[in-house]
Image: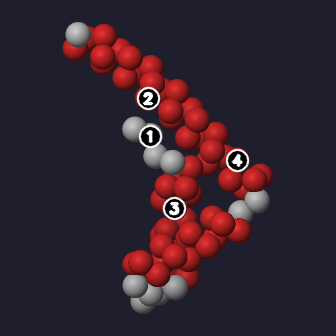
Amino acid sequence: RPPSAYLLYQNEVRHEVKKQHDGLPYHEVLGKISGQWSDLTDEGRAPYIEATRIAKQKYEVEKKRYDAQTV
């Protein structure tokens, strides 16, 4: 399955957030990222939502192809 929009965002910003909050435990870094995601506008989330939509379409095509081969 393709990753969610939130996971795409998290993967993109994790390194920078860890650098900004050096020494912060990992679960707290994830909390900061979660807060940033919550604060994003719909416009800010749009690229991640679109990337998820495209990945989901690709996944569905590949899954149908796989299912057809295994029947």
Dots 1 and 4: beta carbons under 8 Å?
no
Quadrant where the C terminus sits is top left
Q: How many marks?
A: 4
Q: Is residue 35 left or right of residue 58?
A: right
Residue furthest out toward the bottom: 23
Quadrant where the N terminus sits is top left
Q: Which mark is residue 2?
A: 1
Asked if 9 appears above or below 29 in the picture, the reply is above
Dots 2 and 1: beta carbons under 8 Å?
yes
Whichever of callouts 3 and 2 sits on the residue coming sooner in the sequence is: 3
Q: Which mark is residue 42?
A: none
Inspect the image, locate mark 4, and give the three-letter code of the amino acid beneath it.
Answer: Ala
Among the 4 quarters of the image, the one containing residue 17? bottom right
Q: Give coordinates of residue 59: x percent, y percent.
A: 43, 29
Dots 2 and 4: beta carbons under 8 Å?
no
Q: Give coordinates of residue 55: x percent, y percent.
A: 51, 34
Q: CA distance from mark 1 to mark 3?
A: 14 Å
Dots 1 and 3: beta carbons under 8 Å?
no
Whichever of callouts 2 and 4 sits on the residue coming sooner in the sequence is: 4
Q: Which mark is residue 46?
A: 4
Q: CA distance from mark 1 to mark 4?
A: 16 Å
Q: Secondary structure at mark 1?
A: loop
Inspect the image, locate mark 2, and give the three-letter code of the amino acid beneath it.
Answer: Tyr
Asked if 12 appears above or below 16 in the picture, the reply is above
Inspect the image, locate mark 1, and give the three-letter code of the amino acid beneath it.
Answer: Pro
Q: Residue at x 58, y 35 (%)?
A: 53
Q: Which mark is residue 59?
A: 2
Q: Give coordinates of residue 45: x percent, y percent.
A: 68, 53
Q: Residue at x 77, y 52 (%)?
A: 43
Q: Which mark is residue 10?
A: 3
Whichever of callouts 1 and 4 sits on the residue coming sooner in the sequence is: 1
